[in-house]
Image: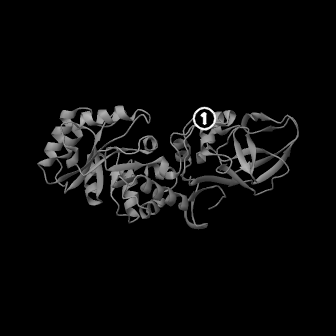
Amino acid sequence: MYRNTYVEVNIDNLKYNVNKLIKEYSDYKYYFGVVKANCYGHSDKIVKYLVESGINYLAVSSLEEALRIRKMKIKTPILCLEPISLEHIEECVKESITITIHDFSYFENLIKKQYLNKLKVHIKIDSGMGRLGFKNSNEVYEIVEKIRKRDDICLEGIYTHFADNKKIDKQINKFLEVTSLINLKEIPIVHLGKSGTLLNFKKIPFANGIRFGLIMYGYNPNNEYKHTIISKLLKKDFNKPFEYKSAFKLYSEIVQIKKLKKGEKVGYNGNYKAKEDIVIGIVPIGYSDGYMRTNKNSYVVINNKRYQVIGDVSMGMIAVKLDNGVKIYDKVTLIGERISIFEVAYHNHTIIYEIMCLINNNVPRILVEKGKIVDIVEG
């Protein structure tokens, strides 16, 4: 590490979350850990800890993500949620990577390949998202029947992805409608539930698989920061108790402290003008790291006190309005204690998924377990 700007990933919290989820949803047999997008920005080096804690199937977006995990010598089954280019199917066979069948023409071209060798596939149903997946029950039936007559493809699973966390029944009914011509009991893995639906819908009777995404990383997908504000004002809690532990914190430090006189400016185009004599601190993080320019006027925490970001966010630096209680090299919390990721997302008019995923590989991930650094992931 060449600068003291980093994401701290708490392995103990991740393990706690997985153990709690598996205990809470023990009715299921297959526990999918969704580890796409570099494990939601946490680093794919955490995958081994998820597997150790009981995750018995992994879900990624792309073949590239799957192959990175295989290079870590992890043998756990991996499902690619996005279509894999047919020219790379041989790599899926070689590395035991399960692919998604999302379209009839894709399937027709797939079965023309000569080296499928028991390739595992999951059929994707469109239950309302309007993206990938089948909406026609006859097509699903035809594919299942064609696979049944072959010995070079294994129909291991069928699944959908809910678009609306609150209208589960309607989407389940759509899934059942599209799969009405096949016997779901004959398919080894049926998985529908995801983080956003787990807290509202305990068990889907005919499913034996469940996908853990955001909730596995310790965040409530149904939480909204504005509700938190309203709750405080009304002294009422709108959100159900949430007992999972977040694992993602973003830190940096103060690398310079300087005094500005009234009227002096900060940043490009002098977008901030001091209304009085002030003290500012410079922090080495910016939009090239994924810390968005819209963080202007947001807050950071130093020594358990909140301070405002002033001026424009630069490519690699921000300025913070301080007081005399801050020293050079003091630790700066950008996401963590007293500055939740929900607040950061709310300020940036986005969702917490984007906040975590945008913090790119310029920023090292420090993996901490039992208070000790177990790995530093750079680049």
Q: Using the image as rendered, state which of residue 160 and residue 130 is in the foreground.
A: 160
> Can you see residue 378?
no
Please tell me how crowded label 1 is: few (under 14), some (14-19), or many (20+) other residues with Cα within 10 Å: some
Residue extending farthest to the left is 149
Residue drawn at (18%, 55%), measured in percent from left and top? 115
Above or below — where is 367 with respect to 332?
below
Res 202 → quadrant: top left
Above or below — where is 348 with respect to 111?
above
Q: Position of residue 160 (x, y in %)?
A: 33, 40
Q: Position of residue 210 (x, y in %)?
A: 37, 49
Q: Using the image as rendered, state which of residue 37 and residue 211 is in the foreground.
A: 211
Q: Position of residue 330 (x, y in %)?
A: 75, 56
Above or below — where is 261 with respect to 66?
above
Residue drawn at (45%, 41%), measured in percent from left and top? 196
Left or right position of 228 against 303: left
> Can you see residue 152?
yes
**Total marks in image:** 1
Q: Which residue is mark 1?
A: 227
At label 1, the amino acid type is: His
What's the coloring here? one colour
Q: Using the image as rendered, state which of residue 246 and residue 310 is in the foreground.
A: 246
Q: Position of residue 185 (x, y in %)?
A: 22, 47
Left or right position of 222 against 308: left
Residue drawn at (24%, 40%), measured in percent from left and top? 106
Q: Tell me the quarter of the image containing the N terminus.
A: bottom right
Q: Secondary structure beneath disc 1?
A: helix
Left or right position of 153 against 162: left
Res 345 → quadrant: top right
